Image (cartoon, rainbow, N blue to C red):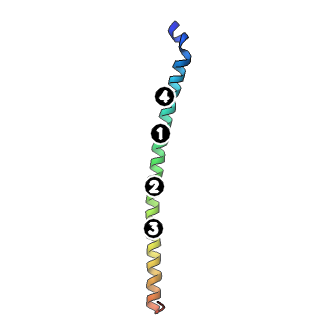
């Protein structure tokens, strides 16, 4: 019991560091999921932009404006 009383600050700091690392890891996992979602959204946006460009080119080609 005396050992705990002598080193309580070190023990509390170690527990705090462990909790901080766990929170940091969970935040990293959440950020990785967000990045994956953003890349997927970017891919969809790029495909939609390409489709839009293709429709415009087809419309201009059909009307003889190119």
Q: Is residue 1 visible?
A: no
Q: Position of residue 44 (x, y in %)?
A: 44, 65
- Reading the image, the residue beneath label 2 is 37
Question: Badge 2: few (under 14), some or many (20 or more) residues near its Cα, within 10 Å?
Answer: few
Would you say the residues marked 2 and 1 are in contact, meaning their CB atoms lie under 8 Å apart? Answer: no
- Reading the image, the residue beneath label 3 is 46
Q: Residue at 45% across / 43% down in the picture?
A: 29
Residue 18 numbered tag? 4
Mark nearest the camera among 3 and 2 is 3
Mark 3 or mark 2, earlier in chain: 2
Q: CA distance from mark 3 to mark 2?
A: 14 Å
Vertical placement of residue 22 versus 65, above or below? above
Total marks placed: 4
Mark 1 or mark 3, earlier in chain: 1
Q: Nearer the viewer, residue 59 or 14?
A: 14
- Reading the image, the residue beneath label 1 is 26
Mark 2 or mark 1, earlier in chain: 1
Would you say the residues marked 4 and 1 are in contact, meaning their CB atoms lie under 8 Å apart? Answer: no
Question: Badge 3: few (under 14), some or many (20 or more) residues near its Cα, within 10 Å?
Answer: few
């Amino acid at each position: 019991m005396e050992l705990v009383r002598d080193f309580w600050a070190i023990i509390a700091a170690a527990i705090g560091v462990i909790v901080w690392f766990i929170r940091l890891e969970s935040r990293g996992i959440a950020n990785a999921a967000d990045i994956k979602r953003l890349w997927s959204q970017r891919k969809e946006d790029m495909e939609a932009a390409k489709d839009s460009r293709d429709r415009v080119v087809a419309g201009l080609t059909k009307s003889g404006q190119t």
